[in-house]
């Protein structure tokens, strides 16, 4: 069973990028609500971007419009500055922390293994909602795709894995998934490491991960789950750049309203658009 509502649980809000900021802002509205709404204390981390000032202005505007009264910024310019106790204190006091898009490598250089990275983990353990979009989504997992080619066909050495924050174990997260045709690179990563589950998230789409296990999909697109635990692959032997043979992989396509169990790797519920499906699932489990 999914965790009961009403108790504080570790929560991640992982967005596939290009979320709506000017219209209904459905995805960001959910993040602000999780962070406490009008009582929230949101900290924005624009470090991944090459245009930090513009990113700060944009998110401050949309978060304020959505009811967040207090928005601080943590933007360490170097790895050494990630030891600043004042920046650490801002993360410790936050009810919501949001990491913008940009370069995953900039984030991996300045957060994992530093006091700021430790503060992010501590905040997550204490129930602060940790959100991120695009690069800020990829950094959530223990290992992240830091670069790689795009395309539908999985190929040998199609991407590179780099250490992430480790806020969620056992998965690799990819973003801008359908829009930038990243199916191939995520499948290649998971086929080579079949103990890991691949999660690809479309733009303007988010997964809300609770208790480090269950996630529910929000937004206008789809979250894909790639499972190669029982698949066969020639990943150990394929030459560099060659198309990979992957047979027996399981792919889940999950629109808004779907709830998924990352531990058992199965659909738990689907209620938003097709309540009859939820009835069928409940009947089957009875």
Image: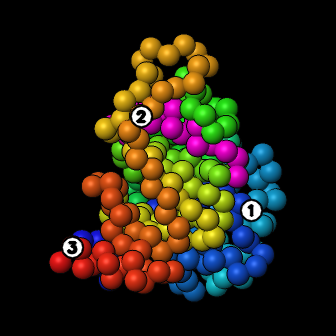
Residue 118 visible: no
Is residue 187 inside the magenta stretch? yes
Q: Is mark 3 on a helix, strand or loop?
A: helix
Which callout, 1 or 2, points to the residue nearer the camera? 2
129 shown above or below 75: below
**Rendered residue at 23%/74% (across/down):** 284
Q: In this view, does 231 lie to the left or right of 85?
A: left
Q: Mark 1 or mark 2: name the one nearer the start of the chain.
A: 1
Q: Mark 2 or mark 3: name the one nearer the start of the chain.
A: 2
From mark 1 to mark 3, how far is it between C-alphas? 47 Å
Instruction: Give the colour scheme shown.
Output: rainbow
Foreground pick, 222 / 248: 248
How packed mark 1 is, by other alpha carbons closer than 10 Å (few <14, some 14-19, many 20 or more), is: some
Foreground pick, 30 / 111: 30
Q: What stretch is highlighted in magenta?
A: 179-196
Q: Tell me the residue that label 2 is attached to.
A: 247
Q: Tell me the residue that label 3 is attached to.
A: 285
Q: What element carries label 2?
A: strand
The answer to whether marks 2 and 3 mark residues whose Cβ atoms lie closer than 8 Å is no
């Amino acid at each position: 069973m999914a965790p009961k509502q009403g108790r504080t649980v570790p929560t991640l809000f992982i967005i596939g990028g290009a979320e709506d900021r000017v219209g209904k802002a459905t995805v960001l509205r959910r993040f602000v609500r999780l962070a406490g709404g009008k009582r929230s204390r949101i900290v924005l981390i624009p470090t991944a971007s090459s245009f930090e000032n513009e990113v700060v202005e944009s998110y401050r505007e949309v978060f304020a419009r959505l009811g967040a009264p207090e928005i601080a910024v943590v933007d360490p310019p170097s790895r050494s500055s990630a030891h600043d106790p004042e920046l650490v204190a801002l993360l410790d006091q936050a009810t919501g922390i949001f990491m913008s898009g940009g370069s995953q490598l900039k984030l991996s250089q300045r957060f994992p293994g530093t006091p700021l990275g430790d503060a992010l983990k501590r905040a997550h353990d204490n129930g602060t909602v940790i959100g991120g979009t695009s690069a800020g989504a990829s950094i959530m997992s223990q290992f992240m795709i830091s670069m790689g080619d795009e395309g539908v066909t999985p190929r040998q050495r199609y991407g590179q894995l780099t250490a992430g924050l480790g806020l969620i174990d056992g998965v690799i997260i990819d973003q801008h998934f359908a829009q930038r045709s990243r199916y191939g690179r995520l499948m290649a990563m998971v086929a080579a490491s079949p103990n890991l589950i691949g999660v690809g998230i479309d733009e303007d789409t988010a997964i809300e991960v609770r208790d480090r296990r269950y996630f529910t999909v929000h937004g206008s697109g789809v979250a894909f789950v790639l499972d190669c635990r029982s698949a066969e692959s020639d990943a150990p032997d394929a030459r560099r750049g060659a198309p990979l043979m992957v047979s027996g992989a399981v792919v889940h396509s999950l629109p808004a309203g779907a709830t998924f169990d990352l531990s058992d790797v199965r659909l738990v519920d689907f209620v938003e658009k097709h309540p009859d499906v939820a009835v069928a699932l409940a009947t089957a489990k009875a």
